[in-house]
Amino acid sequence: MSEIEQGAQEVLRVPLWVKAMVAVGGVLFVLQLPGFQTSLTDAVDKSRAQTAFDRADFAQAITLYAGLHAKYPEELSFTRKLGFAYYQSGQYPAALQTFDQLVGKTMSKDEVNKIEAAVADMAKKLNLDSK
């Protein structure tokens, strides 16, 4: 065997620990693929829901936000946006019920003010405000 061939073989010798690390990394990557697909799908649904809301397609926004809210009930933004989609579509009882899920949760003052304004408007339209 020539010196060049011996040098090539030595270069190709990969330590066992490197092979093991590559194998473990590969397994971890494959295990993460289902979760990544779900996350990617959810990101697409979130974008589609916002686009539907912006286009005033509240039925589509409700469908998408309801799915996201069911999957991630701890994500307050999905609950809030679902409530506003119901509100904008005139489904006031559903909007009030959805906003009720946010009572006691930590939100920005701006978010709270917007929800309070929507609730006051619905109460007026439903003749629920006390006089």
Image: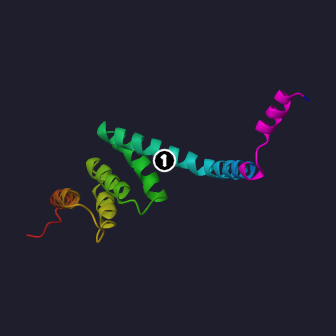
Amino acid tagged 1: Asp
Q: Main secondary structure of the magenta part?
A: helix
Q: Nearer the viewer, residue 29 or 21?
A: 21
Q: Is residue 57 magenta?
A: no
Q: How many marks?
A: 1
Q: Which residue is mark 1?
A: 42
Q: Residues within 10 Å of mark 1 (few under 14, many from 20)?
A: some
Q: Where's residue 26, x and y in %?
A: 69, 47
Q: Where's residue 48, x and y in %?
A: 41, 40
Q: Nearer the viewer, residue 97 or 49?
A: 49
Q: Nearer the viewer, residue 37 or 48?
A: 37
Q: Where's residue 16, x and y in %?
A: 78, 51
Left or right: residue 9 compared with residue 64 = right
At x 31% / y 36%, what residue is drawn? 55
Residue 16 vs 11, above or below: the answer is: below
Name the secondary structure under disc 1.
Answer: helix
Q: Where's residue 88, x and y in %?
A: 26, 48
- Indicate the quadrant containing the C terminus: top left, top right, bottom left or bottom right: bottom left
Residue sitting farthest toward the left: 131
Q: Which residues are magenta?
A: 2-18
Residue sitting farthest toward the right: 1
Q: Is residue 10 magenta?
A: yes
- Indicate the quadrant containing the N terminus: top left, top right, bottom left or bottom right: top right
Left or right: residue 16 compared with residue 47 = right
Colouring mode (rainbow / by chain / secondary structure / one colour) = rainbow
At x 22% / y 59%, what residue is drawn? 115
At x 88% / y 27%, what residue is drawn? 2
